[in-house]
Amino acid sequence: MKTDLSIVVPLFNEEESLAELVEWIERVCKQHNYTHEVIMIDDGSTDSSWQVISNLSKQYTAVKGIRFQRNYGKSPALHVGFKAAVGEVVITMDADLQDSPDEIPELYSMIVNDGFDLVSGWKKVRYDNAVTKNLPSKLYNGVNRRLTGIKLHDMNCGLKAYKKKVIKSIEVYGEMHRFIPVLAKNAGFRKIGEKVVQHRARKYGVSKFGWERFINGFLDLLSIQFVSRFGKKPMHFFGAMGFATFLLGFGIVMWLIMERIREGAGFGLTNKVGFYMALTTMVMGTLFFLSGFIGELIVRSAPDRNNYLTEEKAGW
């Protein structure tokens, strides 16, 4: 039977909220007659979360559980959940009850009826600490909008909806869950929307938020931007860098030679600090070139070097 909806819930130490969350999801899905599954990924919890999931899977036929042997992080949990999902629409949400399952019908409709590839939630009114989370989050999202061109107010919102093809076409790894819209855009999915969603105050447990995510997130964003532009053509980046750097060093050497000739002092340059700066620059340019060649060799040897996403075919 066709499954309308897959709800993927990554979690870590959320034993208190799981039963209430599943009951709420089940109530909403039954009200709208969705055929659905709830995939709960236990990211190495140290409390009784897995036991709760096991019990819920016996109580509700739609509930499925996957358990990691240790804590790997949200991105690996989402990757495994996406791999297992079979629904035509996939919705992700956090397990702490700060995301409301009542948002599911409208998110589903925006994918099915409005034709969006991806819809991201926007927690316009938040119940988090304004200094430690809200303000940094606004700055963080502002930088993301400027660098990626994706006009989302809350790119890292855990409540999102996707066409199945989107989550089957991208790979979420490391800490890249913060940038799934960027991964989707780079994979060719352009219709990315946003919906204002309810943000509820935390009822159970403690926040897993840490300041280090902003530093790591910025570095991850640079990685995504680089790989998306030069992942299959590294020489275009390293070659240009190498050419420009080598040319700069060579230009400095020529300028020093002309200065020595003008002064009538011959071609001796070893007593000039600028000579060693130019030499270092030329060596750096050569290394950039070599890095580009090595990158090209790696890309040509990669098994997925000719993997390209296709939309449709006709006449085959």
Image (cartoon, helix red, strand yellow):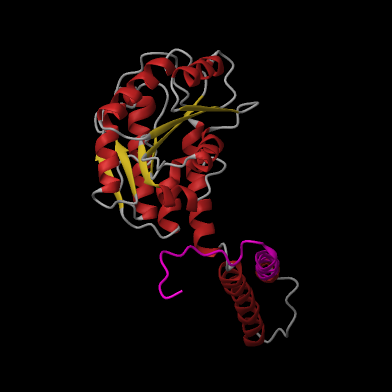
Nearer-the-camera pick, 168 or 258? 168
Chain part drawn in magenta: 287-316
- 152 relative to 87 in the view: left or right: left
- 307 relative to 294 in the view: left or right: left
Residue 298, magenta (yes or no)? yes
Task: Identify whether 57 is placed above or below 123.
Answer: above
Res 134 quadrant in image? top left
| Residue 42 in picture, x, y percent from top left | 54, 25
Nearer-the-camera pick, 252 or 232? 232
Residue furthest to the front in view is 1
| Residue 248 in picture, x, y percent from top left | 59, 74
Answer yes or no: is residue 313 visible. Answer: yes
Task: Identify whether 223 is placed above or below 239.
Answer: above
Res 8 quadrant in image? top left
Task: Identify whether 270 is placed above or below 108.
Answer: below
Nearer-the-camera pick, 267 or 301? 301
Identify the residue at horizontal 44%, vertical 12% (top origin).
Answer: 16
Identify the residue at horizontal 25%, vertical 33% (top origin).
Answer: 124
Nearer-the-camera pick, 301 or 83? 83
Residue 86, magenta (yes or no)? no
Answer yes or no: is residue 199 visible. Answer: no
